[in-house]
Image (spheres, rainbow, N blue to C red):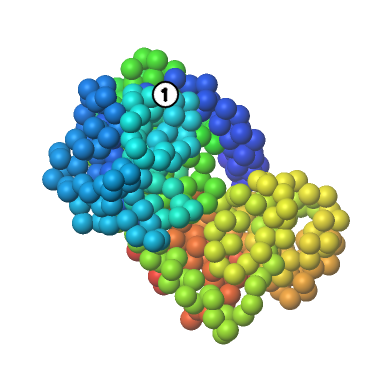
Amino acid sequence: MDDRSRVTLSIAIVLAGIILAVAAGSLVSEAETDQAKGTVIDYGDRDTVWTETDIHAYQSTQELLEHACESNGLALVQDDGGDIVSIGDVVSSDGSEWGLWVVYPGSIEWVHLDAPYTQDPSEFTITSWSYVAEGEEPTVAVDYSGNPIYGYQQKLRVVSLSPSITEILGSVKAENIIVGVDSYSDHPQSVVDAARSGKIATVGTYTSPSFELIMGTNPDVVFADSSQRSHSVMMEQLRSTGVDSVLLYPGEDLESIMDNIFIVGTVINYELAAEEVIQDTYEVIDLLAGHVFTPEAGGNVDLMISLEPDISPWVSGSGTYLSSISGLFNSTNVFSEWGGWVHVTSDRVPHANPDKIIIVTSEYSATQAEYDYLYSNLPAQWKDTEAWRNGEVYVICESAADMVQRFGPRTAQVAELVAMILHPKAFDTEVPKIIGDGYEQYLSYSSYMGYD
């Protein structure tokens, strides 16, 4: 496959995922969801304690709470009105408080219930006694199809249906239990080598997984991507045959990506490794933000993100991965009034007049000659922008382009590249105008987070 074919396919996959994500979400309410075989005590920041038990054995959520606390050796204190004063040594305060949160069957949304806790636990998909700050919600406890993520037995044969999921499994050091991946999974290298040798099976493409090939791996659990309708359909088919299947959330922002890592770690009992990845990601992003939000870094940057250098390009609106990541670092997406990826007319580019432009493409190689050709041959409308006039057009290509389109554990590396593009004066290292396979050489804070 030549470079031009690759970019066409890459763009098609991204756009197909965007369009089909909406359709996939409709399965949440239609699917028959399982009921949790236990309950959660949630201390916040994804610090949870799972208590496995037959919830039908309890007449009320109060009885279930008491059992969970007793099972884990946690002192429970409630006031006269039934509100929780403390669980263990964590006391309700002005900023955060304990409470009962539930997910109803056919939903993925948390609902807060007031004391007294006289409800029947079997009315809900899952219950969580959570220490939650005002305006926030508990840790994710169901997947995108509404199924609980707790209570799975140890998984020794795992199938991934997307490159992002394969990378998550690699980041938590679970490569040795992967038995199947999609044909686009090319990171980490250990998985690529295992697939080439036949130790890991290829179970179809990212957009078209094969039921027969998946079943041929004798999987314990299959992880699917909700941004693909075909994955949601496959998940239902697999569940109907008794195969555990987990549908991850669309990776539209930092929190949903971290939730997906948490879900994968919880399901396969690699919680500590997942927690390490999540903590490292937040630490790097906090460090980057500390550099960016300074007088030396400069002010807010108006940014345009495009999938190609065309006269009428597909551009990133709000609610997309790159838009969300760039928004963490003192920038404004000039097309944020639209959601998702948007095909804009040629006149919209000079009207938006971005300060900087990032083009994500696999059509070019990371050489100065390739960049000069692209930059000189941009449409006239692109040249009528501050970004072009000031030489602030950046190209992300080759394997770097793959990375920035995947909603996975290399988010910290994506964030560092984006932060350096937006605010070069805030960093000692300067990134070139075209970034490809050698992107890791420019990373200072996230260099160890390639998980390869």
Question: Where is residue 136 drawn, in percent x and y?
Answer: 46, 52
Please state if 68 lies on the left or on the right of 1 as rendered.
left
In front here: 189 or 61?
Answer: 61
At horizontal 38% and vertical 52% (from top left) the residue drawn is 132
SS class, disc 1: loop
Question: Can residue 199 be seen here?
Answer: no
Residue extending furthest toward the bottom:
296
Q: Quadrant of the C terminus?
A: bottom left
The answer to whether residue 40 shows anywhere in this view is yes
Count of marks, rendered view: 1
In the figure, is residue 291 to the left or right of 70? right
Say which residue label 1 marks. 33
Q: Nearer the viewer, residue 259 or 431?
A: 259
Q: Name which residue lies at 36% across and 45% down.
A: 99
The answer to whether 273 appears left or right of 348 in the picture is: left
State whether residue 293 is above or below residue 365. Answer: below
